[in-house]
Amino acid sequence: MKDLTVAAVSMQSLFGDMEANLKKVDGYAAAAAARNADMVCFPELTLTGYSIRDDVGPYAETIPGPSSRRIVEIARKHGIVVLVGMLEKGKGERPYISHVIADPSGIVGVYRKTHLSPMERDIYEQGHDVAVFTCGDTTFGIQLCYESHFPELSTLMSLQGIDILFLPFASPNRDPDKKRASWLRMLPARAYDNGVFLVACNQTGENGRGLSFPGVMIMLDPSGKEISHYAGHDEHMIVEELLQGDLDRARDNRMQAFMNYRRPELYVKLSSVADKGT
């Protein structure tokens, strides 16, 4: 990874108002590009809005499709990599909670949420691929909200060579300071243990479906130290440069390069022990 400037956005997404949400994405992408950002990350379900009601199916689209093509147009117009959430039509009746990655050349990939919260399991289809993506010299992973509680995902992505872990959230019902405190209990460990940068952003404000989101964002370096943060009730964007030197120092420090000293033969039981939650 070379030095990279990354933007993160805490945005209000009204459920079902795709056009208004797309216009906001366009505006923030333009603002990020004006500040020389290479990538801009938006929250989970940016375009569709978040809902835990069982009537979300009509708002899902195919990818490629109308909204994902608009995302590509935004990326091309502003010369920036854009990470945006939306509902994607699944193979059955249930849609995926997906995140689209687009650069000026087109759709780079789609990440589908693999771990659904208890409130989501009867509404959405779960993804089955722990994918990572590459744009230019940077390889990165995406985990959506509830998935951040499963350390195995971060390990799998790190073993596939990620430099940055993006965590787009749609996490309601806490004030910004309490949500940030919750993140700081777990997210620094994801960055530190895996030697990666971490960028997290949440939706903010009322969503028109009875949910209210605290505007929270955080960027961490590969030592788990905070680079930047925001906690408030308004829409906001943060832009920071992620330095290759910080990544190299973490990975060259033999007391911190934990991934180099794993013993996977001891972890076989992780995939064979019965899950008491199923």
Image: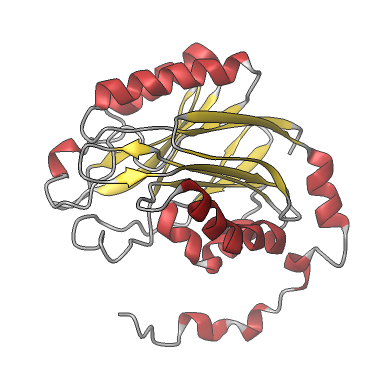
Compare residues 43 and 38 and report the one nearer the observer: 43
Relative side of 203 to 88, left or right: right
Image quadrant for the N terminus?
top right
Which residue is found at the position 55% from the left and 48% from the top? Answer: 141
**What percent of the width, then of the height, locates residue 77?**
48, 12
Color style of the picture: secondary structure
Q: Quadrant of residue 59?
A: top left
- Nearer to me, 19 or 207: 207
Residue 123 % position (x, y): 19, 56
Q: Is residue 30 above or below residue 238?
A: above
Say which residue appears at 57% left-offset and 21% top-offset: 32
Which residue is painted at 87% across and 65% down in the image?
Answer: 254
**Left or right: 215 in relation to 154:** left
Q: How many numbered discs, if any?
A: 0
Question: Residue 120: image x %, image y %?
Answer: 26, 59
Q: Residue at x 38, y 62 (%)?
A: 115
Residue 12 visible at all: yes
Q: Is residue 277 above or below residue 196?
A: below
Q: Is residue 72 visible?
A: no
